[in-house]
Image: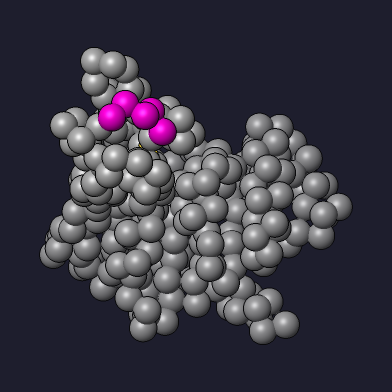
Amino acid sequence: MLIAVASGKGGTGKTTVAVNLALSLETQVQLLDCDADEPNVHTLLPLEVSETKPVTTMVPSFDESKCERSKECAKFCANHAIFVSEKGITFFPELCYGCAGCVIICPSKAIEEEDRQIGVTQHGTTPQGVDIIYGQLDVGEALVVPVIKAVKAAAQKDKETTIIDCPPGVSCQLVESVHGSDFCLLVTEPTPFGLHDLRLAVEVIRRLKIPLGVIVNRAGIGDRQVYSYCEKEKIPILMEIPNSREIAELFSEGIPFVTQMTEWKSKFQDLFKEIQRRLKQ
Ligand code: SF4
């Protein structure tokens, strides 16, 4: 089963939920950290990295001696990654999405494809036996989606349960991360900001036709608007995590709270069973 853990905004406790769920299950679990801009699963679950693989994307390579200054490549490139003048070609690799359209359209055959590294995937296992794969974008790079794709492609398909820690927000990074999941857990806070971002996330996940449920983190703060919204939209609230000083202190020390507050393991196991039950229905 593939469970995505997402949230409309950062800082809601999405990674906390993904990590504590992974540690609570008695099945074989792998955890994919698709927040390649700022992966942090490995800070809560230290692991010995056993494999590092580069992630590359295609970029065009220009042969100026063949270029006849047609400017077809620059006209084609929707990202304005190419500027052609009589003096030569200027290429902005960080704007290039690697579509290869310029290679195909060049009438002088002056452009070829080459690979450029934009990040890595790291693989390892924690002492608790959780397999982790996380993506890490290289400094200065902006193309997160190819790194997310690489993380998902590296996942072992024979694992009973795969949990995906998605990037925050509702951009294409979320869509790529959550795509193909059996179920999506949306983590939110019971505040007006939490509600605003939850609404956006629900819209995206519903368009992808993925069953979803909500986890309310820091329950007890804010107001009841998130609860009213979920009731109106018939979205199940599958868990509430209280606004607890103990949980916050453990998090600040990089300790997943189920390892100290062990009564929570059974709550996460119940959450997992409830997801299975809903999927069977
Ligand atoms: S590969 Fe695509 S995005 Fe990159 S420069 Fe060429 S046309 Fe632009």
Residue 221 vs residue 245: left or right? right
Q: Main secondary structure of the magenta part?
A: loop
Above or below residue 91? Residue 227 is below
Residue 13 vs residue 186: left or right? left
Residue 25 vs residue 235: left or right? left
Above or below residue 20? Residue 68 is above
Residue 244, magenta (yes or no) = no
Give the image location of residue 27, x and y in percent: 40, 81
Give the image location of residue 82, x and y in percent: 35, 28
Q: Quadrant of residue 157?
A: bottom left
Please give the count of numbered marks on the rendered protein.
0
Q: Nearer the viewer, residue 148 or 128?
A: 148
**Quadrant, the C terminus:** bottom right
Q: Is residue 39 in view?
A: no
| Colouring scheme applied when the structure was drawn | one colour
Give the image location of residue 74, x and y in percent: 40, 29
Q: Nearer the viewer, residue 246 or 229?
A: 229
**Which residue is located at x 38 percent, y 64 percent?**
152
Give the image location of residue 19, x and y in percent: 40, 59
Q: Nearer the viewer, residue 174 or 59?
A: 59
**Which residue is located at x 49 percent, y 71 percent?**
2
Q: Is residue 273 in view?
A: yes
**Which residue is located at x 25 percent, y 48 percent?**
113
What is the magenta range?
68-72
**Which residue is located at x 25 percent, y 32 percent?**
67
